[in-house]
Amino acid sequence: MRTIQLQGVSFPVSAICLGTAYFGSRDSEALSREELNYYYDCGGRFLNTAHEYGYGASEQVIGRWLRDRGNRSEMVITTKGGEDDTKPSATAMRREELLEDADVSLGRLAIDCIDFFLLHIDDPDVPVAEILDTLRGLQKAGKIRHYGCSNWSVERMEEADAYADAHGIERFVMHEIEWNLSRRNTVNRGWFVKWLDEDYIAWHERTKMPVAAYSPMAMGVFSKYAAAGNFDTCSLYQRKFYESDFNRRMAEKLMVLARETGYSIVELQIGYLCSQPRGFADFPIVGSSKLAQLQESLRGTDCHFTQDMLDYLQEE
Ligand SMILES: NC(=O)c1ccc[n+]([C@@H]2O[C@H](COP(=O)([O-])OP(=O)(O)OC[C@H]3O[C@@H](n4cnc5c(N)ncnc54)[C@H](OP(=O)(O)O)[C@@H]3O)[C@@H](O)[C@H]2O)c1
């Protein structure tokens, strides 16, 4: 698999990151290992998990897999903390809580150091000074290599960058946020900020901060639309957030492009994110509930978008 370079990071990362949110919970450990092995055999070396996924099950499955394969030194591991996993969507971003999350994640993953430790959400009531000093402390203690954020607003990232610069410490090295070809119906959905819209893109262009694109396939709604000709087979949750005229038109465009290019709808969605002509690096974090889905997603790295293809999908 191709690798890419992230600003401020000395080692390369795989162009596609493996999402593991359901490992050991919705998806059995056997299926999770099948996906980990397949991804690894394709050259993938970049995993994304979180302290709260499956109440720790995802990190534990990864930890056991790393131990059994003996390949920890080859893998780049991102985990996320700062969320209270006994109360999903509740923040836990005070110093003691972040320190505890990092220690618990290190224990579950059975590793000495986390490559990327991200703040899963934000709690604007906690000053960036406290958060960054805590992250810097973890870095100095050798428990994390780099840190970043997820679902943060531009304003808070700006505050964090200003604090980092004023104190000569590392800025966030990535921002993990939803990015795909859909447009969500609801902007304010609890602790999720929103998807990577034009305001975020402009900010990332300016700062060059890399983007980790989660839900790159909008949870599969375009595939479901293409198979059924409508959104009826999507879950109620997916319909609430994604059923709209804009997304219907996007699904139809993807179907046209798939017929014309021979790429599948999934390959096109991954190829779109891997071909962004932007001033910042980005990579998709792919999710799947079957091995065959992962196999198709990884083929997306071979889907190269021309400017015409980008224009076609982006025109209103
Ligand atoms: N930082 C955050 O707040 C945050 C939030 C969400 C996710 N994430 C990260 O991002 C990862 C991916 O998120 P996601 O699961 O929402 O992403 P996604 O890749 O957009 O959606 C995955 C879903 O798309 C469908 N799909 C995938 N491949 C397919 C194929 N070949 N054919 C048809 N359908 C296909 C499947 O739906 P079905 O199962 O219905 O078939 C699959 O479960 C997570 O594991 C996690 O690591 C982070």
Image (tube, helix red, strand yellow):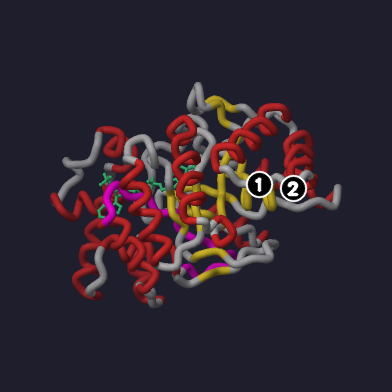
Residue 39 at x, y = what percent?
40, 60
* CA distance separating discs 2 and 1: 8 Å
The kind of residue tagged 1 is Asp
Within 10 angstroms of label 2, few (less than 14), some, or many (20 or more) residues?
few
Query: Residue visible at 60% across and 33% down?
Result: 104
Q: Residue 90: within the magenta? A: no
For residue 112, the mark is 1
Task: Say whether marks 2 and 1 touch (CB < 8 Å).
Answer: yes
- Asked if residue 302 lies left or right of residue 90, the reply is left
- Can you say which quadrant of the picture contains the N terminus? bottom left
What percent of the width, then of the height, locates residue 198? 51, 55
SS class, disc 1: loop
Q: Position of residue 70 (x, y in %)?
A: 52, 56
Say if the magenta span includes residue 283: yes
Numbered mark located on residue 199 in the image: none
Looking at the magenta stretch, what is its main secondary structure? loop
Give 264 or 109, whichever is nearer the viewer.
109
Residue positioned most to the left: 228
Identify the residue at image location x=67%, y=59%: 207
Disc 2 Cβ-to-ligand 1 distance below 8 Å: no
In the image, the segment drawn in magenta is 276-291
Q: Is residue 125 visible?
A: no
Q: Which badge, 2 or 1, is on the more N-terminal residue?
A: 1
Task: Kindly indicate the quadrant of the structure image that contains residue 108.
Answer: top right
- Residue wearing tag 2: 142
Closer to the camera in the image, 274 or 20: 20
Q: Does residue 1 appear in the picture of this structure?
A: yes
Residue density around tag 1, few if under 14, some if 14–19, many if 20 or more, within 10 Å: few
Identify which amino acid the numbered label 2 is placed on. Gly
- Quadrant of image for the C terminus: bottom left
Q: Nearer the viewer, residue 225 or 48?
A: 48
